């Protein structure tokens, strides 16, 4: 019996007979010669079927195969420089598992709506395959970084009684007569966790009812959020730049073939190493005005502003100390200028926009009580959070990194929708 193998490890089987289980990606019919491009999830390999070398029914089976038919193919692995992956299979046997019906996605161009309606099938294409493998690597790197650097994973709830990031993007659901909201962020709970564990992170899906269609917003996205007790804004930025550099480096070393498939020019990614440049919000506004962009001090940046700022720098850029009024309620005021908050955004280079938001949280019970009132937040729902300032309050900082925006940047994608297997966007809940 020939050994079963995966395409990605085919080099180990050079000259041997192996069995591969997969799907037909593409077929070229050259009469007595059939070229089958077979994929198995780990890679793609060209399988060559020669009429004179195989039994009649094997050749007939090869000829009958339609795009995306599932098959088990046995043959001899041979190194061949001209073959797509450097190897090809000289076929001896084929078992057709299922002859696929006419496949809707063909090598010709399809519109985005069509592809999104067929997302469950679109995942099989080489580009989507590459993107989602980069995503998985980014997620693995995220976990490795925090696990190896003294952060404890402490999970946070998804059904919550109150808003973390403003009340305008809440998803509401009935909770046996009460109202629950899908978590916009795990941060507030991580603040409780650090008082028990020191350094923690949470990582999971987060939800925002974003009512506008943009290239950078999803309604459901994955965010990783580290939180650290006894850390200030500067320490937060130091961790963030080390962390982002670690992720990029991992994608560059472990997902080279995928980045190549995506035609990503990796030169700019190679430059992502600490330290990252840091500018204040005031300075950023100055730059925007020099560029002739319309922007009022006090507003939050939109995509065009982020792009305009980032283009002055080769690495990701930290913009810190935003006006208190344009940020969430929990920010620590700047002791030198109380109208500013100790907040920070990290903007990816090349116009990919904000990938991180974070800062130092206020340690003061009085300030927090005042902000909850100013933001019209229901105080009862935040009593537990206020407790954190009553019992051993300490300076603390943290941030959140959006996985999809990070993957869009690393892969060089124009739109965030391809960075998650099944995107949830305005008017898109299917499939
Ligand atoms: O800046 P945000 O809103 O910060 C927070 O949620 C903080 N509570 C995080 C913290 O300090 N623990 O979101 C953080 C990041 C953004 O920089 C962006 O990368 C991503 O989450 N993000 C989104 N990604 C996709 N679609 C959306 N609608 C997103 N909203 C935020
Ligand atoms: Mg933000």
Image (cartoon, rainbow, N blue to C red):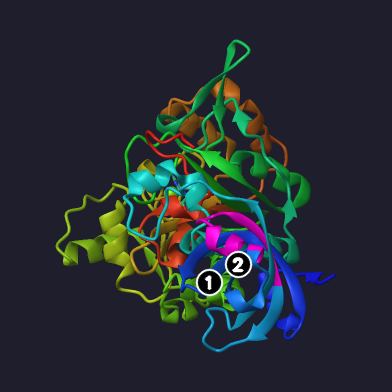
Marks 2/1 in contact by CB < 8 Å: the verdict is yes
- Closest to the observer, 219 or 155: 219
Residue 59, disc: 2
Q: Is residue 308 magenta?
A: no
State which quadrant residue 253 falls in.
bottom right
- Closest to the observer, 140 or 107: 107
Q: Is residue 63 magenta?
A: yes
Residue at x 31%, y 50% (from the top left corner): 111
Along the horizontal axis of the image, is 18 left or right of 330? right
Q: State which quarter of the image contains the N terminus.
A: bottom right
- Closest to the observer, 103 or 210: 103
Q: Is residue 342 visible?
A: no
- Give the image location of residue 212, x and y in percent: 32, 38
State which quadrant residue 231 falls in.
bottom right
Residue farthest along the top direction in this orientation:
177
- Give the image location of residue 132, x and y in percent: 55, 59
Residue at x 67%, y 32% (from the top left corner): 387
Q: CA distance from mark 2 to mark 1?
A: 8 Å
Compared with 316, 357 (above or below) is above
Name the residue tied to disc 1.
Answer: 34
Residue farthest along the left direction in this orientation:
292
Query: The magenta stretch spans which residues?
Result: 57-74
Label 2 secondary element:
helix
Q: Earlier in the sequence, mark 2 or mark 1?
A: 1
- Give the image location of residue 290, x and y in percent: 17, 67
């Amino acid at each position: 019996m020939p050994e079963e193998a995966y395409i990605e490890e085919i080099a180990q089987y050079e000259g041997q007979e192996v069995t591969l289980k997969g799907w037909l990606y593409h077929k070229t019919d050259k009469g007595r010669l059939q070229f089958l491009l077979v994929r198995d999830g780990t890679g793609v390999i060209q399988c060559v079927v020669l009429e004179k070398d195989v039994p009649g029914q094997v050749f007939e089976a090869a000829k009958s195969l339609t795009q995306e038919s599932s098959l088990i193919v046995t043959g001899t692995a041979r190194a061949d420089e001209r073959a797509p992956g450097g190897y090809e299979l000289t076929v001896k046997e084929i078992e057709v598992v299922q002859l696929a019906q006419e496949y809707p996605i063909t090598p010709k161009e399809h519109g985005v709506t069509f592809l999104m309606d067929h997302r469950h099938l679109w995942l099989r294409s080489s580009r989507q395959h590459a993107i989602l493998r980069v995503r998985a690597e980014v997620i693995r790197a995220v976990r490795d970084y925090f696990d190896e650097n003294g952060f404890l994973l402490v999970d946070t709830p998804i059904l919550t009684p109150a808003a973390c990031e403003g009340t305008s993007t809440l998803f509401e659901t009935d909770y046996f007569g009460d109202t629950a909201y899908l978590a916009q962020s795990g941060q507030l709970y991580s603040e409780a966790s650090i008082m028990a564990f020191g350094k923690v992170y949470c990582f999971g899906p987060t939800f925002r009812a974003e009512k506008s269609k943009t290239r950078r917003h999803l309604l459901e996205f994955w965010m990783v959020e580290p939180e650290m007790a006894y850390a200030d804004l500067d320490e937060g930025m130091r961790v963030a730049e080390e962390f982002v550099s670690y992720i990029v480096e991992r994608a560059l070393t472990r997902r080279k073939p995928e980045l190549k498939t995506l035609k990503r020019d990796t030169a700019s990614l190679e430059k992502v190493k600490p330290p990252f440049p840091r500018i204040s919000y005031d300075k950023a506004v100055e730059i925007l005005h020099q560029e002739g962009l319309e922007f009022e001090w006090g507003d939050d940046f939109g995509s065009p502003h982020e792009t305009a700022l980032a283009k002055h720098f080769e690495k990701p850029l930290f913009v810190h100390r935003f006006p208190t009024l344009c940020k969430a309620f929990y920010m620590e005021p700047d002791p030198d200028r109380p109208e500013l908050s100790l907040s920070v955004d990290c903007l990816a280079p090349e116009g990919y926009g904000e990938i991180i938001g974070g800062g130092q949280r206020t340690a003061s019970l009085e300030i927090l009580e005042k902000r909850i009132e100013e933001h019209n937040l229901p105080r009862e729902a935040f009593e537990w959070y206020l407790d954190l300032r009553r019992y051993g309050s300490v300076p603390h900082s943290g941030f959140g990194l959006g996985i999809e925006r990070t993957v869009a940047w690393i892969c060089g994608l124009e739109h965030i929708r391809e960075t998650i297997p099944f995107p949830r966007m305005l008017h898109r809940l299917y499939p």
